[in-house]
Image (spheres, helix red, strand yellow):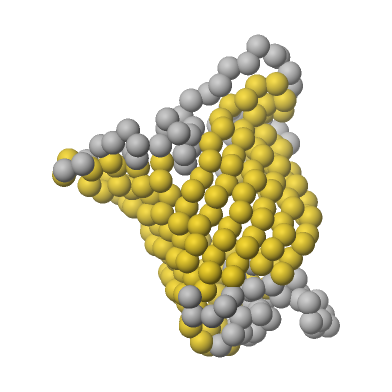
Amino acid sequence: MLKQTTPKKEGKYISILADGLFHMTVAEGTEGAVKRDYETSALKSGFDFVTNIMFVSKYLQNIYINITPYYQTDFAGTANIYGNVLSFSPYNSFLHLGGDPTSTTSTSKYFHANKIFWQFSPEFISAHVNTVGTTFLQNGSRFLGGVNVFGNFNFDIYKINKITFKVGREFLVDALSDKTVNYFLTSLSVPLASSSSDNPGKSVTPKLTFEYARGTDKDTLYSTNQFKISLSGTY
């Protein structure tokens, strides 16, 4: 659901340009027939409200504000956690911050760099844990604040289009405890066919993703050091 509003200048910024409400569900973790101490999981569901504010400035053009109330349990259904996430994603085309509206050129027929940009996103999480379940959380309240910084590189190699390489780090501190989240992530996504935008007749584009993650997961406080391969589809 997307609602467009008419931009209106007010001082050095333009008021709310667009807002949307989207459903969000995320599941990650392990669960076996026999419970083991190292097994942990998180199943989150909620709604993501997005607001876009446009600024009349060459230094800051847009800020996307995400407000996400959510409920979290685990694969066994024993965890009982609810909370809210507030994040800010600034955009500046000149600095390649938040996105890259341009496409770079290349003389090679085997390699072409499409988009190069980076992301800087402050994030704040307020949550209450009623039942920890299979997470490593503690009963009570949580209030985390920090930042996510990622670099994104989209390119083509020979006949494989829109390969995406992403690398970055997430760092959050819980103001109510001594817990910190320091999470490193790098991934390489390779489409296995032409995208549906290139071929309107195809509704799903299969994608193979190689991902390496190391650090503390913010939803479970589980320390991970893993490499995984996943197959997904985009519409």
| Residue 109 picture quarter | top right
Left or right of residue 212: residue 42: left
Determine the residue located farthest toward the front in the rendered image: 178
| Residue 68 picture quarter | bottom left
Residue 123 in percent (x, y) is at 46, 61
Q: Is residue 230 visible?
A: no
Q: Is residue 34 above or below residue 153?
A: below
Q: Is residue 172 above or below residue 73?
A: above
| Residue 133 picture quarter | bottom right
Residue 235 in percent (x, y) is at 57, 43
Residue at image coords 78%, 51%: 229
The residue nearer to you, when weighing 69 against 123, is 123
Residue at image coords 56%, 32%: 116
Residue 110 in percent (x, y) is at 73, 18
Q: Is residue 204 above or below residue 121?
A: above
The residue nearer to you, when weighing 178 against 121, is 178
The residue nearer to you, when weighing 21 against 97, is 97
Residue at image coords 26%, 48%: 16
The residue nearer to you, when weighing 128 against 43, is 128
Residue 66 in percent (x, y) is at 40, 57
Left or right of residue 45: residue 224: right
Determine the residue located farthest toward the top in the rendered image: 107
Residue at image coords 53%, 69%: 173
